[in-house]
Image (tube, grey):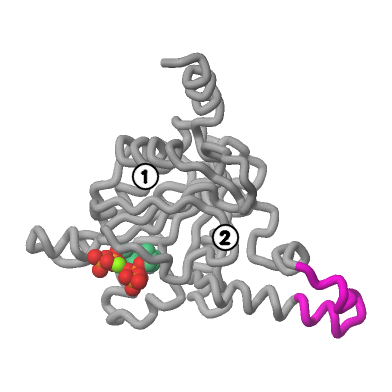
Amino acid sequence: MSKSELLRAAHIDAIAVPRHVAIIMDGNGRWAAARGLPRAEGHRRGVEALRRTVRAAGDLGIQFLTIFSFSAENWSRPSTEIRELMMLLRRFVRHDLAELHSNGVRVRVIGERENLADDIRRLLDEAEQLTKNNDKLVLVVAFNYGARQEIARAAQRLAAAVSAGDLAVSAVTADKLASYLDAPDLPDPDLIIRTSGEQRLSNFLLWQAAYSELVFVPIYWPDFDHATLESAITEYRRRERRFGGLVARTGS
Ligand code: IPE
Ligand code: IPE
Ligand code: MG
């Protein structure tokens, strides 16, 4: 290796880990179908993959992990599948919250909470409240989440501030609008991973993904583990982030 290559490698090592990783956990149904199992079994195995991934993210030193667990458009699925997904969320919070808390994980939730069942809303509030002082890893759960809906909610809050006379129309900038999003204090994701081979965002973090690196992995979500996360990060490290400028920055 030449001296400049060595320097570059050292630089890459120092910034090896993306600060914020977001994951579109896709392919539970196809994982199950490939094994002749009901889709619900794929979702159950998906929760196990999630547990592994939260642990792996902590071990790798990732600070923010956002997971897409139920989209605003997923309500169009059969009611039996929706019931199963709601049940799994309840179970995940009830069974895993204490352990997440003792591991220093802070839980945040983004998405629309108004039209969720009361007990689910309470569980999500409880998870946020209990863990609010933790700082090892922030786990952002995108539940009943759609990015266009989130941007519309932000626009609504912003419009209310304008019409109340608290905000001048001329003060409406991209940063100002972003400050009304569901979790405005979080950094944008450096890396977005989607499993299952699909190459689309499906209404996930459209605003925040402006300069995210996208990595699509061909495996189904229930097979995701520490090694898959690491190899997605290795791919991320090969990317050159330019943010519209001319100077490349590798990694975040
Ligand atoms: C991801 O797996 C879980 C959710 C969207 C809730 P899918 O249920 O979308 O599985 P596929 O894409 O049909 O295989
Ligand atoms: C995106 O996956 C939503 C979640 C992973 C929760 P979908 O399976 O709903 O996305 P499409 O329908 O294939 O675009
Ligand atoms: Mg899917």
Name the amino acid, label 1: Arg
- Give, as a single range, the part of the protein colored magenta: 158-173
Name the amino acid, label 2: Ala
Q: Residue 210 shows which numbered tag?
A: 2
Image coords of residue 23 (percent x, y): 42, 53
Q: Nearer the viewer, mark 1 or mark 2?
A: 2
Residue at 48% of width from left, 75% of height from top?
117
Q: Residue 51 shows which numbered tag?
A: 1
Q: Where, quadrant-wise, is the C terminus in this rendering?
A: top right
Residue at 62% of width from left, 53% of height from top?
244
The secondary element bearing badge 2 is classed as loop
Image coords of residue 99 (percent x, y): 46, 40
User: Please, is residue 128 above or below residue 252 in the view?
Assistant: below
Name the quadrant where ligand 2 sits.
bottom left
User: Please, is residue 233 above or below residue 40 in the view?
Assistant: above
Mark found first going from the N terminus, 1 or 2: 1
Image coords of residue 132 (percent x, y): 64, 47
The verdict on residue 171 being magenta is yes
